[in-house]
Image (tube, helix red, strand yellow):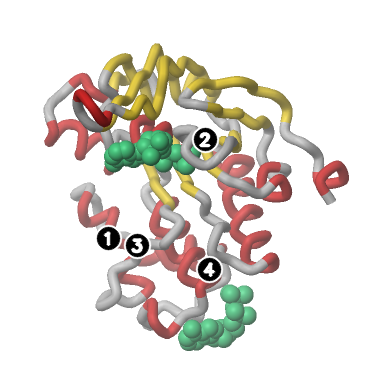
Amino acid sequence: GEALRLDGVRKIYGVEGNRVVALDGVSLSLPAGSFTAVMGPSGSGKSTLLQCAAGLDRPTEGRVFVDGAELSGGGEAALTRFRRERIGFVFQQFNLLPTLDVMQNTVLPLKLAGRKVDRALARDVLGRVGLGDRLDHLPAELSGGQQQRVAIARALVTRPRVVFADEPTGALDTRSARAVLELLRGSVRTFGQTVVMVTHDPVAASFADSVLYLADGRIVGHQAAPTAETVA
Ligand code: ADP
Ligand code: ADP
């Protein structure tokens, strides 16, 4: 089935004199179980696309469907609930809560979604990201790579249908970046999740199935991802 659909999405920031058209009529359809990289120059609208598709921001015009349901269908509370149930988001700067340990950060989305705080599940996900022995560590006690892996565990723990990641490897060294990309690809292969990832890095993009190219708020290409050999 279709995991994500955008129909004629426009996003305009600002008013009158300083209007910025960040997205200028974006339409796309991504199948469930796909891993898509979004690339394009700085300012081309990549982050805005992710924010609108994930329901973190509202398009000025157009419609967004996740898992067949229209994102803007209900009010603010309905949107928040929908997001917590079906969407995971990984930020470049991790966004972990500094006073919560690794386990507490990871189970937070379950709490917010009003679901059972399943520590065994969280331990399993943290084990898969290689943090099984760090459950009671605070974010400040972890390396950048480890913090990003906690952020990914947190995004995956609710088993969302669609996971959005905005430059998840931007702040990481090569080895940590690889671990994060393999995790994202693994969640697609293993759980049939759909991943949409903004990246500047052709090596990171080679982990995806396809690459969507943006320029000036429009999609200017969508093609098979380059292979690791091509970009090496
Ligand atoms: P990218 O992620 O490709 O760098 P963005 O989506 O961040 O692009 O930005 C697209 C355009 O929208 C840019 O011209 C940017 O300056 C503008 N923009 C992004 N966010 C805002 C905002 N909150 N207010 C005003 N303009 C914004
Ligand atoms: P990763 O590959 O996950 O980024 P590193 O090789 O950078 O891990 O770090 C190795 C070890 O050093 C980690 O297990 C971590 O405990 C510790 N470490 C790295 N950076 C920091 C930091 N800023 N604060 C505390 N511990 C750190």
Q: Sequence-wise, which precedes: disc 2 or disc 4?
A: 4
Q: Disc 4 vs disc 3: Cβ atoms closer than 8 Å?
A: no
Quadrant in which residue 202 is drawn: top right
Residue sitting nearer the eye, 229 or 104: 229
Secondary structure beneath dot 4 equals helix
Q: Which label sits in the foreground, 1 or 3?
A: 3
Quadrant location, ligand no. 2 = bottom right
Residue 30 in the image: x percent, y percent? 53, 23
The mark that comes first in sequence, 1 or 3, is 3
Instruction: Residue at 36% x, 25% y: name it.
Output: 21
Report which residue position mark 3 lands on: 95
Identify the disc placed on residue 194.
Answer: 2
Q: Residue at x 60, y 44 (%)?
A: 190
206 shown above or below 220: below
Disc 1 to disc 3, how far (Cα)? 12 Å
Query: Disc 4 marks which amino acid?
Result: Gly
Q: Residue at x 52, y 42 (%)?
A: 42
Q: Earlier in the sequence, mark 1 or mark 2?
A: 1
